Each structure stands twice: as C-alpha cells, then as structure tokens.
Image (tube, helix red, strand yellow):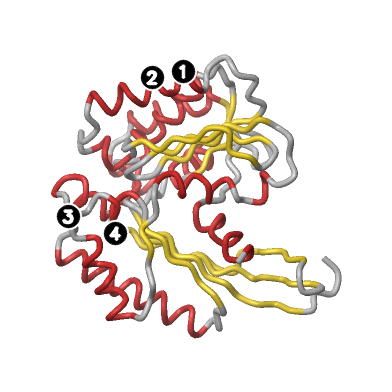
Amino acid sequence: MKNPKKVKKYATIDIGSNAVRLLISNIYIKNGKDFEATKNSLVRVPLRLGQDAFGLGKIKEKNIKKLIDVIQSFVLLMKVNDVKKYLAYATSALRCSENSHFIVERIKKKTGLSLEIISGNKEAKLIAKNKIFQNNEKLFCIIDVGGGSTELTLLKNNIILKSKSFKIGGVRLMNNLVSTKVWNGFTFWVKNNLKNLNIESVVGFGGNINKIFKLSGNNNEKPLSLRKITLTLNKLESLNFEEKSIDLKLNPDRLDVIVPAGRIYEYIIKEISAKEIWVPKLGLADGMVYELLND
C-alpha cells in the first residue's frame, strides 16, 4: 500500500479454554475506506480455564482472579500502545461455565473491559473472515480445533455453506470429557456433510496445528501433508516429558493437549479423503480484527 494516510492500533482479546491471547494490530487506512491490518504484537497467557469449566462446570475463584489479573495487564498494554478500538470475546470454557456471567461482570467492574461470550457458530464466522478467504472462489473446508470445541466450516465465495460447532477439543479429550454421544454426533456430521465433495483446500486453525506444523519441519510455503501430521503425532506419543519439554521446547500447557487435538485434524482429513492441510498461522483474534474494521 502506498502512502497510507493514517495508522491506528486495534486490539483483539481471545479468552479460550487453554490460553488467553491479546493481539495488537497495525491498521493502515487510506482514502477513508481502504485498509490493511498487520500484526504488531501477540501476548499469550496459558490459564487452561477449560480444566475447571469442563470438569467442574464452573471456573474456580483462584482462576477467576488470575483471569482478572491477565485482563488488567492487557488493558494496560492497550493503553501504552495507544489502542483505539478493541474486541474481547470468550469461547468454549466460559460458554460452559455456570458462573460465566458473574465473571464477565467482575472483569468489567475490576478492569473496565467489556467482554462478550460468543457461540461456536459465531466463532466459525469470525475465523472465516480472515483475509486468506477474501475474493477466493475455492471451496474451503475450515477446521478449527481449540481446547474445548471444534468448528467445521464449508466456505465458498465468502459465503458459509455449512458450519457446525462440537464440544470436542484438546482439553476435553485429555480429561476424557467427550461423551460417546457427542463423538458419534461429530463423526456422523463429518461423514454426511464433508465427504464426497470437491473440496479444493483444507485450512487448519489453532495453536496445536501451528505447533504440529513447526515440529514437522514442513516448508512454510507449502501445505502440511497428512503423512507428516501422523508421523509428528506418533513421534510425540513416543517421547517422555523431558524430551517434549526440553528437547522440543514445548510449553507445559501444550504437552498434553497437542496429540489429542492433532488426532482430530488427522481424523477429519482422512474422512474427507484429503492429503494435506494449509496452516496459515492465523486464528480467532485475527478474524476479530476484520470485524472491528467492518464496524
């Protein structure tokens, strides 16, 4: 873009089941309507709220306090970065917590930040707003596996043809909190809605598929093959704690969820007879930026 007349900073906060993220983006505006967003900084704090939400049905007080502290630090970071606008969304963990509205009110009172708990369908729509899908006529299958939910979306010409959210994710799987009924509903939907279609591109979102991509040694400009996903997951399963945390430099909150989450991607890719998946290293927070811009 030549000679942008204005540069602003927008922020998006994603409160997930495994971690809380703050993305600050540079917004370049030209002629009052054209814009481009680039990443300024990203902060990720592992809280694993899903451990409480999916196992106990509510977030423990000590973790509520931690979340408030994290949000307060994000508010300060937004202030020193002169952030002009922000969005803060919470997903699966708070959706499933009986004390979620109490938490939202406490965050507002303590930090001044307005937080919205969004549905799985809205989560999928935000992912689909990422710029890689704009003005593209391909039929995309989008897979987004988080700690508490998996969103599957069929997208073509910026139009969502089918979308479904399931209570299946890395944190739920590692704690054996996915019922047979939920899993059967998931596999039934995949077989009846994603198979035998002329899907031209499979795209994966989420921290775990990004990490699998990195560990596989894949070329950054190429899609990740199903074979490499399987080899990487099998290798991870064979390693002990020290090998994964020290040799591979995996964060503690990633060690136990990466394989269960990875197997979901692997399963879907196999079922739809695909051979590879594109991993653009974007996420919900990036899609939220475009929602802010559209406002």
Q: Which residue is mark 2?
A: 188
Q: Toward which corner of the image does residue 120 lie, by quadrant?
A: top left
Structural crowding at the residue carrying mark 3, measured as other residues with C-alpha within 10 Å and reported as few (<14), some (14–19) or many (≥20): many
Observer-nearest of 190 and 1: 190
Q: Residue at x 24, y 67 (%)?
A: 103
**Mark 1 and mark 3: Cα distance apart in space:** 34 Å
Q: Residue at x 32, y 51 (%)?
A: 17
Q: Position of residue 285 (x, y in %)?
A: 51, 58
Q: Which residue is mark 3?
A: 58
Tell me, for residue 192, which label it has, or none. 1
Amino acid at the residue labelled 4: Leu
- Please give the count of numbered marks on the rendered protein: 4
Q: Toward which corner of the image does residue 208 lie, by quadrant?
A: top left
- Of the two numbered discs 1 and 3 on the same chain, state the one appearing first in sequence: 3
**Mark 3 and mark 2: Cα distance apart in space:** 29 Å
Tell me, for residue 47, which label it has, or none. 4
Amino acid at the residue labelled 3: Lys
User: Do tag 4 and tag 3 residues touch (Cβ < 8 Å)?
Assistant: no
